[in-house]
Amino acid sequence: MTNQLKTAVLLAALSGLLIAISYWVIGGSGGLIIGIALAAVTNLFSWYQSDKIALAAYRAQPVSEGEAPGLYRMVQRLSERANIPMPRVYIVSSQGANAFATARDPEHAAVVVTEGILKILPEDELEGVIAHELTHIINRDTLTQAVTATVAGAISFLGQMVSYSLWFGGGSRDDNRGANPLGVLLTVMLAPLAATIIQLGISRTREFSADAGSARLTGNPRALARALQRLEASAKQMPLNANPAYEPLLIINPISGQFMGNLFSSHPATEERVAVLLKLEQQLPITTY
């Protein structure tokens, strides 16, 4: 199964989960309609606001060519090579080394790096990171990730509301008009967990695709592989204070150490990403720019 198909399946599962929860909790066709409406509204909201929300979450500040000439020209050069409009360039005032991109489409895009990543990566490795983020923009991954974060948040919010309702004695026992007891239990206990697992699965799938796109764009998969290893080592020493909802946007898991299994990780294991990149190195033709 291709990465694109995997993403489509997981997105469908996430929206379906939101609709199913509404059906079971509220009951009947009314719950189904509300679930569909919630899915539509959250996806539409993400479409128009995803870039602004992510930039605000990390307090990213725009920079001009005069303020960061090397970074600006690198983004400009790679954007021309990728044949996309140059995205806006932002810097996050943090010594945690990381980067991300956000956009609803290539015409409304931004590439964001931290001060920390500019300090620790040599030029060829930073180029690999920027190419990775541009690939996210080309593939519209940033929108996909923002939508999944919003829908997953809506599911968790619905679960919390049901939990509060039960705590304060709300709800009806009428089988025809009240909340379905099994649906309530599943919502409170399992739905937020399932939504998180699906959201993180989408994030891992998109990271592999962006790594491959970076390798093709730069012709230097090994540089990105080295960058990922360097960034992971840096995260163990100085993790980025990341917003959990938007952690999947980042190029590397910002949390120091791996205390959870792959099922609950927003990123594939760095060792696995490096292995795939080195394999790609053997397949790509030698290209010089």
Image: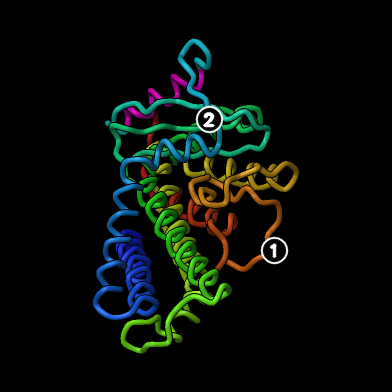
- Colour theme: rainbow
Provide residue 289's location: percent of width, then percent of height: 38, 27
Foreground: 177 or 253? 177
Provide residue 258's location: percent of width, then percent of height: 68, 60
| Residue 146, label in figure | none
Q: Under tag 2, what secondary structure?
A: loop
Residue sitting at the far right: 237
At x 53%, y 57%, the residue is 266
The local crowd at label 2, few if under 14, some if 14 to 19, many if 20 or more residues have their Cα within 10 Å, is some
Is residue 173 inside the magenta stretch? no
Q: Which residues are magenta?
A: 70-81
Q: Which residue is mark 2?
A: 60
The local crowd at label 1, few if under 14, some if 14 to 19, many if 20 or more residues have their Cα within 10 Å, is few
Mark nearer the N terminus (1 vs 2): 2
Foreground: 181 or 256? 181
Q: Which three-letter amino acid code belongs to the residue tagged 1? A: Phe
